Image (tube, rainbow, N blue to C red):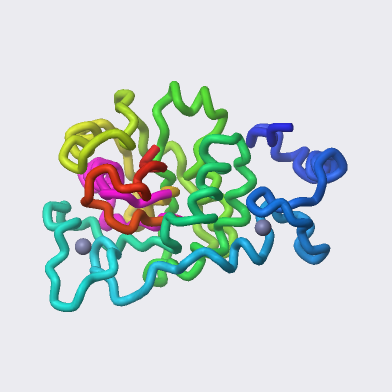
């Protein structure tokens, strides 16, 4: 049974009961029974504990762990005002599977199991607004929800941040990033976003996966041009070698 889209959120309690009754209480990833204490989770605690945190030290701007003394190639061309991208876990093994369930299998509630891993990424204290990276209208219709918005909404209560899903939008549809080289990704998303930003609060972009950062940079540019004083970003997962072409980790990429 597919999960229910957000407009029916007020029915969530009843639906969860129905869902639990209809479905065996098994973890989506390992298919073992989910512990009673955890009985609302779609991913069991053991699978979540196997996600590998992205370690420090990392580049202060793009968050990629660095070899000693190495210069970061990923964020060299990023606009001033955009920085502080952090990712919770590597896009590997069961974390990749979780992203797959969230994005391609209709299980938007998996975001609730993924969000706790992202809570350690809280940006500097202060009042900020979470901005999910938007999907194109066609993809949003096809999927029924935006996976980044589901993550943002799952994180927001812990940080007491607002989620603003209408401040950034896609001006045009873009090709899927997964088949593109890093340079082609940048060209694909350049100028693809519009934004408006009333007020002086900082923007924190939320996305599921960091690969080359091309989409995040394009959204950040739109927000900075619209007057956002600063833009940072958090993602659930990160590809290990974002600048290498055709690496396995990029198989699930941006959007
Ligand atoms: Zn499991
Ligand atoms: Zn960097």
Q: How many marks?
A: 0
Residue 124 vs residue 154, the one in the foreground: 154
Q: Residue at x 27, y 49 (%)?
A: 213
Q: Quadrant of residue 134?
A: top left
Residue 227 versus residue 145 in the image, above or below: below
Residue 245 vs residue 6, the one in the foreground: 245
Residue 232 versus residue 141 in the image, above or below: below
Q: On the picture, is 82 further left or further right than 106? A: left
Residue 92 vs residue 2, the one in the foreground: 92
Q: Residue at x 31, y 37 (%)?
A: 195
Q: On the picture, is 52 further left or further right than 28? A: left
Magenta segment includes 113: no
Residue 19 at x, y = what percent? 80, 40
Residue 23 at x, y = what percent? 81, 42
For ligand 1, the image quadrant comes to: bottom right
Quadrant housing the C terminus: top left
Q: Residue at x 54, y 55 (%)?
A: 94
Residue 51 at x, y = what percent? 52, 64
Quadrant housing the N terminus: top right
Residue range of the region highlighted in magenta in the rendering:
209-236
């Amino acid at each position: 049974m597919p999960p229910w889209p957000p407009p029916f959120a007020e029915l969530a309690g009843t639906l969860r009961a129905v869902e639990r009754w209809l479905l065996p209480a098994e973890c989506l990833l390992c298919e073992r029974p989910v512990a009673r204490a955890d009985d609302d989770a779609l991913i069991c605690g053991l699978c979540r504990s196997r996600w590998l945190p992205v370690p420090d030290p990392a580049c202060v701007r793009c968050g990629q762990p660095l070899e000693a003394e190495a210069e970061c190639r990923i964020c060299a061309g990023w606009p001033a005002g955009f920085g502080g991208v952090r990712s919770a876990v590597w896009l590997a093994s069961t974390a990749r599977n979780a992203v797959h369930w969230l994005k391609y299998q209709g299980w938007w509630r998996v975001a609730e199991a993924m969000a706790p891993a992202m809570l350690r990424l809280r940006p500097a204290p202060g009042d900020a607004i979470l901005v999910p990276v938007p999907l194109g209208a066609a993809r949003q219709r096809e999927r029924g929800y935006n996976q980044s918005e589901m993550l943002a909404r799952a994180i927001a209560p812990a940080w007491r941040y607002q989620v603003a899903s209408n401040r950034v939008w896609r001006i045009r549809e873009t090709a899927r990033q997964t088949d593109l080289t890093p340079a082609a990704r940048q060209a694909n998303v350049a100028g693809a976003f519009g934004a408006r930003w009333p007020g002086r609060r900082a923007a924190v972009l939320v996305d599921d996966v960091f690969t080359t950062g091309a989409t995040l940079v394009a959204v950040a540019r739109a927000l900075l041009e619209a007057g956002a004083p600063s833009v940072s970003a958090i993602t659930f997962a990160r590809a290990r070698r974002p600048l290498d072409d055709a690496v396995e980790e990029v198989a699930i990429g941006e959007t």
